[in-house]
Structure formats: structure tokens, C-alpha cells
Amino acid sequence: MAARTPLTRDRVLRTAVDLADAEGLDALSMRKLAKAVGVEAMSLYNHVANKDDLLDGIVDLVVAEIYVPEAGGDWRAELRHRATSAHEVLLRHRWATGLLGSRVNVGPAMLRYIDATLGCLITAGFSYEQADRAWNAMDSHIYGFTLQAINFPLDPTEYASAATRFLPLIPEETHPHMHTLATQVIAGTHTGTADFTFGLDLLLDGLAALPRRAEQP
């Protein structure tokens, strides 16, 4: 008889992430998770205290996949890498963005992630107040853009056909700017798709323009 794989907290959490990825967070239950790891539901409580502990654990696993910026180099490049990495990770785990924005996350991966981000900014000469506001502004862009990308009802390949359908609702006489924009999407001179890096670079440009002390050696 093959030996059963020992049940650990890490195995429980990683299985929960897989279930949430496959079926969504609403479908994740202790009963379903127990079945996936081959135990009775009560056995899970040897590894997670309750459902809240489970949710905190799985969101911290997701955060652990995000690039952690390094201090002392090109702070702008580091924060850009951090932001694009976070966006890509959250698109892979489509349930995680809402969880990140609705809970107080103090897992080890999140604490390391935040501290490293602050360190990158502070070492580059930003004050603690500036650094705190900067990473929160960046995360607002990341989370908001990601949620929109996940929930928007149209695929980018459908934008031109959608613009064609909506054009009669925005005649040039009453909505000249929207009409012109729609005709550009229909003609293919503008894709109509939102650009994550456009907003990100605006934020980074604004941070770069802030007055700050000399960078630490």
C-alpha cells in the first residue's frame, strides 16, 4: 500500500489556491477542500484555525509570487517590475484582488513585500510619508486596473464590433468626441484597449517629480 502524503498547512493552502483558481473563491469550502486533500473536514482544523485563517493563508501565497523590489538600484525600474509582476500574478489568480483589498493582510510574504517596497523608496530619498502614499497609490492602480480587466464584459477582439453597434447611440451632432473615438476604434487606428503601463508610468513620473532628500549611498 502506497504511503499517504502527509497533510501539512502548506499542502492545505496550495490545494485551496488551486481550487479557487479552478472554481472561484465562492466555491471554496472546507468540505470541498478536505475532499481534495483526502481527509475529513475536521482534520483541516489541525492546520488552519478557521475559514478566515484559510483566506489569509491563500492570499499570502499569491503575494509570495509577486516580484519583491530591491533597494539601492534604479527605484523606478524596480517599482515598475513590482507593479507589472503584481498585475500578472493577480490575473492568474482572478479571485485574489478582491481579497487583497478587503482584508488586513499581515502574512510573512505580504510583510516582506511591503517592507521591501518602502525600503526601495526610502533608500531612493523619499520620506516615509511619501513612500507610504506612493506604494498605496501604485497598489490602487494595480488592483483597480486588474479588477476592471477581469470583469469587463468585452474581449479586446470585440471592441471594433462593439463600437460599430454603439455608434448610432453617440451621433456626431450630440457626442462629437465619443463619436470620433469610436470611429477610430472601428477603423483600427486606435485599439480602444486600456493600457496598464500608461497609468503606471504617469504615477512613476509623478513620484520622480517629488522633491526628496539625497539618495542614500
Image (cartoon, rainbow, N blue to C red):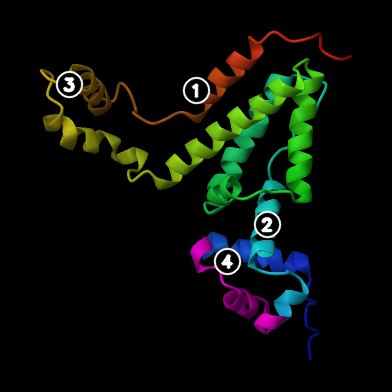
Q: Secondary structure at mark 3?
A: loop
Find residue 21 and report its horizontal and vertical position in percent: 55, 59
Q: Secondary structure at mark 1?
A: helix
Badge 1 is on which residue? 198
Find residue 71 and report its horizontal and vertical position in percent: 81, 25
Per the rendered image, the range of residues in magenta is: 25-42
Q: Residue at x 63, y 16 (%)?
A: 207
Left/right placement of residue 133 relative to residue 26 reads right
Marker disc for residue 175: 3
* Of labels 2 and 3, the one closer to you: 2
Q: CA distance from mark 1 to mark 2?
A: 31 Å
Badge 2 is on which residue? 56
Sequence-first disc among 4 and 2: 4
Q: Residue at x 79, y 41 (%)?
A: 112
* Of labels 4 and 3, the one closer to you: 3
Q: Is residue 135 magenta?
A: no
Check the image and report above or below for 158 versus 210. Answer: below
Quarter the C terminus occupies = top right
Prevailing SS of the magenta stretch: helix
Check the image and report above or below for 31 versus 188. Answer: below
Residue 132: name its quadrant.
top right
Sequence-first disc among 1 and 2: 2
Q: CA distance from mark 1 to mark 3?
A: 25 Å
Most foreground residue, 114 or 188 = 114
Sequence-first disc among 1 and 3: 3
Q: CA distance from mark 4 to mark 2?
A: 15 Å
Badge 4 is on which residue? 19
Residue 68: name its quadrant.
top right
